[in-house]
Image (tube, coloured by chain):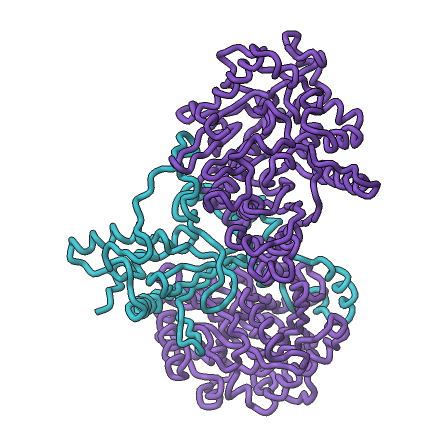
Amino acid sequence: MAELKKEEGAADPKLQFAPFCSALEAGFWHQLTQKKLNDYRLDESPRNIKAYYCNGDPDGLPTRLTLEFSAFDADGPTPAHCCPASGTLYNTNTLEAFKSTDKKALLDKAANEIWDTIQSGAAVDDSSVLNRFILLTFADLKKYNFYYWFCFPALCFVEGVQLVQEPLSLEKRFTAKQISSLQMAYDNLCSLTGSTAVPHFLLKYTDESVHVAPLKDFNSFVKDLKKITVGVYDPCTLHQHPGWPLRNLLILLAKKWGSQIDVVEILCFRDRTLQGSRSIQHSIVFQVKLPDLSTCTVCPKSVGWEKNPKGAMGPRSVNLSECMDPKRLAESSVDLNLKLMRWRLVPSLDLDKVVSTRCLLLGAGTLGCNVARTLMGWGVRHITIVDNAKISYSNPVRQPLYEFEDCLNGGKFKALASVDRLKKIFPGVNAEGYNMSIPMPGHPVNFSETTMAQARQDVEQLEKLISEHDVVFLLMDTRESRWLPTVIAASKRKLIVNAALGFDTFVVMRHGLKKPRECRSEDSSPMSSSNSSSCSTPAVTTTTGASLFSNIPGHSLGCYFCNDVVAPGDSTRDRTLDQQCTVSRPGLAMIAGALAVELMVSILQHPEGGYAMASSSDDRMNEPPTSLGLVPHQIRGFLSRFDNVLPASLAFDKCTACSLIVLDHYEREGFQFLANVFNSSHSFLEDLTGLTLLHQETQAAEIVFVSFSSFCDAHDIL
Amino acid sequence: MATAGAGPLIGPGARKERPFRWMAGERPSASCYLDERTFRLCCQLFLQHSVTIQDGWSWEEIKVADEGFMRKTVLIPVRSDTSHHQDVCSVHTGNTESLTEELQADVEDEAAGVQSVCESPVVLRYEYHVVYSSSYQIPVLYFRVSTLDGRSLSLEEVWSNVHPNYRQRLRQEPWDTLTQQEHPLLGQPFFMLHPCRTEEFMKPALDLAQTQHKRLNYIVTWLSVVGPVVGLDVPLSYITAVSAPD
Ligand SMILES: [Zn+2]
């Protein structure tokens, strides 16, 4: 609070004033921005603006000069019970100009103007001209940085002002009768002047009553120059100090009447209404020895530049990008909506986990578009899209990231156009598109050196992308194209969310997440029927009936290919799923795309993530494992019945994509192995995994059949 | 925000049942809505009382649009005990640090306060705007909180300045309808309490008044309910002193 410093050697204490601190409403900066952009442009000439101050603050608030959005309307109204102050705005075009502006000259100029009004007597007629301010600004509208420096010019007495009588509160100085008489007299003066606040006024009083008059009535009102009291509308709340506006008033008094007045009594008029009850008794009264400036002809020294928050003489700055930068606004609005969902609906929701998840979308068709949009809805910032197709005329009506224009001239690449659109929808997204093909089993790449090199490059690129992301979405429209990312992601222990469409059926599933490599051997099952390795993933045949389809931990869950008894590459088999999206019911992609993202979010909310045990349809009545509910392995939907089921299935030790033998070959031989798969018929993988053998053994086929029929209703879409 | 994901889930994820809400276009009764003229009349009466108790409400006219809104600003010193004090008060100095140094010598200081005293309390400015929404045909409460340099606080910063004792209560409705939106008349970002829930809490009050043959000033009733949610007090005297427009 008050920091009193007595001048050394001074017998009487000197009067000290509380300086104004600048108070800018957020709207002021918005308005300055508008003015700069539409009106001032590069014109640096000074502008008239206005501010106000009030004397009704409760204790503890700083003495303020306030500028609102209305500050640029220099002739506009002043808020009720406030005093206006007129100011000059110097808005520079560059930070250089802001720095190099001669602050002393600006202050001298304003001080001289005030001095002129004092000398001419204009300040006696209208004392509000004593309250002036300067505002120097530079608006960096690229970065939304606003540099500003206020000055509240105050003319100074060289020796200061001596206190003759220490400040007392009005209630200690006046009787209750005098106080109410003063209040009435002040209100009368207000209505006489047609305002709700008077900056300076004269008082005289007896024990019985108090009279007030405007400053200009000095000669008629003041009869006894030995007993003169001046009232000042005082914005300060300190009990021992007046605010800034008294300073120039004292100069005025000293210049005009300094030769006749020795001691002047000052009433710092403070007038507040709290909870409907008005009080002026906390005003302060004191007496000072008035210096004589009557013979002074040059403007006294002046001060007034505001200190910065560190207490040093220097400008202030404020960055308003959060409320001005449209991109930041979009970001904060998006975040806010999500946070509100958390606050209100799901208090334990870990949003950061969702927002910071890096998502790789393989496929930018109907599924890809809908998955991307739902990810944006969840605030996911890092989205990468891979596709090799161009946008065709049939796409925009079903693929919500494209427009008619995108189809013209052969069509834009989906991977690139979709990413552009995402950025248009929300500039805060960190999206990248890769126009590339994903090599597929049974689709030879060995026609030439060039095609081999291209395939190698594509594989490397895909491996790199999968490494760089946390979740991989398989959203392609062919079964074979899901094989390579399934293998790579399984090997890299990345979570896969897979969505595939039939005509009116869909499957959305998470692939089982293999255990981290270092602990996999501990888990090896001696009972495993798999003879390929001692450390095998759990196999169908080793699992007891009770736990066959329930309580499957995340690392034992199957992948998209686990349910197959044929290797990918033979497109004659599965007719229902993975056909051209255009043969799906149009709503299906939106449903499945949305479910794929929601499944990912639920997995992320589970403490074990991708290792979370699969919830099943039966768990619908049980305590859900996450704040968002269940974490199923698969969601299979039947639009004809408007029904979803939640089957779970085990990883198959002869799976053509995620079985250990496939992963081992991939990890050991790398591209050479993959090239063999691409270039060979489907029997290559079937031979490798033992499926061929399995086909020949009837009892084994029955086991597979068991695993099939266990998908409750699922078998009818397989 | 709609009741997202209200599915057949049971457990913590399940939401408590909300009263059925009418969709846009169908209305149960006209009582929850008011036309713009009534809005202005209600505000006028509200402001008349504000003048007598001087609690700072004013009418802001937007000249070009012939529209206006009711407005109040409240300044609150920041509690020194709050751990978020730093966040709120931290001044974005950034690259101005050097600027300060450079310019320091340029300007005369008043010899370390020979004639001035120092005070540096930190203050937050709460701005409340009552704006008529012609699409919802009800008043909407906008607000923002800023520091004295004009920087608006994020909702988290606002939240951190809510006394912990109140947080639990405030976590309840209708904080869940807070959104960030442009002020329709000023074009600046504000927080607003979304009007979608207004009917829920206005209807019982209006129905009660109807059965008791009382006429309520809509603004008074509505603001007494929504104001406290965002720290805006509406003195009891409004309820007794402010009448409904004829
Ligand atoms: Zn598999």
Q: Which quarter of the image is occupied by the N terminus of chain A?
A: bottom right
- Looking at the image, can residue B174 be seen? yes
Looking at this rendering, what residue extends furthest in the bottom direction?
A120
Viewer-closest of A359 and A232: A359
Residue at coordinates 70% horizontally, 75% vertically from top-left? A93
Q: Quadrant of residue A294?
A: bottom right
Q: How many marks?
A: 0
- Image location of residue A478, percent across then percent down: 60, 38
Q: Quadrant of residue B224?
A: bottom left
Viewer-closest of A595 and B117: A595
Residue at coordinates 43% horizontally, 47% vertically from top-left? B176
- Looking at the image, can residue B120 be seen? no
Quadrant hosting ligand 1: top right
Looking at this rendering, what residue extends furthest in the right direction?
A449
- Image location of residue B71, percent across then percent down: 42, 66
Q: Quadrant of residue A561?
A: top right
- Image location of residue A461, percent across then percent down: 75, 41
Residue at coordinates 58% horizontally, 23% vertically from top-left? A557
Residue at coordinates 48% horizontally, 37% vertically from top-left? A347
- Image location of residue A179, percent across then percent down: 38, 69
Viewer-closest of B74 and B69: B69
Viewer-closest of A546 and A529: A529
Rendering colour (chain B)? cyan
State the purple chain. Answer: A
Height in image: A574 above or below B131?
Answer: above
Left or right placement of residue A480 versus residue A77 in this view: right
